[in-house]
Image: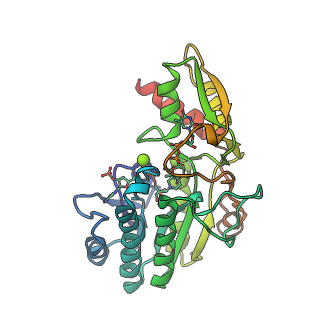
Amino acid sequence: MRILVFGTTGQLARELLRRAPEGVAVQAVGRDTADLTDPAACAAAVAATDADLILNAAAYTAVDQAETDRATADLVNGEAPGAMARAAAARGLPFLHVSTDYVFDGSGTRPWSEGDPVAPLGAYGASKLLGEHRVAEAGGQAVILRTAWVFSAHGKNFVKTMLRVGAEREVLSVVDDQRGGPTAATDIADALFTIAAAFGKGRGVPGIYHFAGAPTVSWADFAEAIFAASSLPRKPVVNRIPSSDYPTPAKRPGNSALDCSLLVKTYGITQPDWRKSLADVIGELEAEA
Ligand SMILES: NC(=O)C1=CN([C@@H]2O[C@H](COP(=O)(O)OP(=O)(O)OC[C@H]3O[C@@H](n4cnc5c(N)ncnc54)[C@H](OP(=O)(O)O)[C@@H]3O)[C@@H](O)[C@H]2O)C=CC1
Ligand SMILES: Cc1cn([C@H]2C[C@H](O)[C@@H](COP(=O)(O)OP(=O)(O)O[C@H]3O[C@@H](C)C(=O)[C@@H](O)[C@H]3O)O2)c(=O)[nH]c1=O
Ligand SMILES: [Mg+2]
């Protein structure tokens, strides 16, 4: 099976390139070939491909920056995936897309199910929701995988930020009232390959699915786990704060927990334990250093 992947340098794109199972060839295209601010270029890449399936791993992920750059976020996260999905549908090719917990408003404490009402708090979440709508409207065989709190040994993420800042400070203030499921890019890549294989066998089931690591924690809990798993000589103390003490341009959801049972039922993909994947990522980072 051949998979055309949009994105080459991102956390997820890199793991897709590294973890393709035997018999799967990943052809990744970057900004030079398909800039997502140019939806027509994305459609052209789909029209020209000899791949059996299309996977979009590229996105505008700068949550705060999106607040003042809404047009670019909507183009990259909304219109470009829409153009990819329409071009894939026109050729009868399955399309796998990735979305986010930030489409929810974060109310309540119950983990969000796929059919729950969406109400993004910020421009990034709104742009990802636009992408979900555009992909659904395209009418093809599409899967939208909503994930959360992605980390890996590469790119920008909370784990790397904590290790960098934690090496310099004795005390770190981290929000304790936003809860979610940290998810390793390696685990998302593997889940997407499982879904792709199902489509390869004619057994793919289109729709929206949730996929996040377990257990659900706060960012402060996650920070403590990161320091515990690291071999920092002097581990910083995590000072637990409310979000109101950590002002940011974009408001984040309080309850980001995703109910992932539909993916288990449909594809047999279980929730990964992020503590295991965190140990692997920290191992990789410390081996590189
Ligand atoms: N990061 C997270 O915490 C979460 C991410 N997600 C979703 O998961 C998916 C993967 O995210 P992740 O791997 O973390 O993202 P990254 O920020 O690590 O990577 C984003 C990728 O998109 C590419 N990209 C951005 N803008 C453009 C553009 N205009 N044209 C072409 N390529 C572009 C980047 O390329 P370049 O290097 O050239 O900029 C990069 O390869 C996305 O859909 C994201 O919304 C969902 C939940 C949480
Ligand atoms: C660095 C730092 C962050 N924080 C807070 C800010 C924020 O609420 C939380 C996490 O910080 P981040 O900057 O990683 O958060 P953020 O960029 O909002 O992460 C999100 O990215 C997008 C792409 C997604 O789709 C989401 O699932 C989610 O992963 O921790 C602290 O409390 N203390 C700190 O020292
Ligand atoms: Mg990033």
Taking the spot 48% from the left edge, 85% from the top edge, the residue there is 139
- Give the position of the N terminus as an image quadrant: bottom left
Q: Is residue 91 above or below residue 277?
A: below
Q: Is residue 269 above or below residue 162?
A: below
Q: Quadrant of residue 246?
A: top right
Q: Pick out the residue farthest to the top.
A: 233
Q: Is residue 68 above or below residue 96?
A: above
Taking the spot 50% from the left edge, 76% from the top edge, the residue there is 133
Total labels: the figure holds 0
Residue 237 image offset from top left, x and y in percent: 64, 21
Task: Work out whether residue 104 or residue 2 is closer to the camera in this orientation and state it.
Answer: 104
Task: Work out whether residue 130 or residue 234 is closer to the camera in this orientation and state it.
Answer: 130
**What's the coloring here?**
rainbow
Q: Quadrant of residue 75?
A: bottom left
Taking the spot 57% from the left edge, 24% from the top edge, the residue there is 230
Residue 192 image offset from top left, x and y in percent: 52, 61
Residue 127 image offset from top left, x and y in percent: 46, 65
State left or right for residue 219 relative to residue 151.
right
Residue 115 image offset from top left, x and y in percent: 68, 73
Taking the spot 50% from the left edge, 20% from the top edge, the residue there is 167
State left or right for residue 144 relative to residue 211.
left
Task: Work out whether residue 105 or residue 42 is closer to the camera in this orientation and state it.
Answer: 105
Answer yes or no: is residue 18 visible.
no
Q: Quadrant of residue 221?
A: top right
Answer yes or no: is residue 23 visible.
yes
- Give the position of the C terminus as an image quadrant: top left
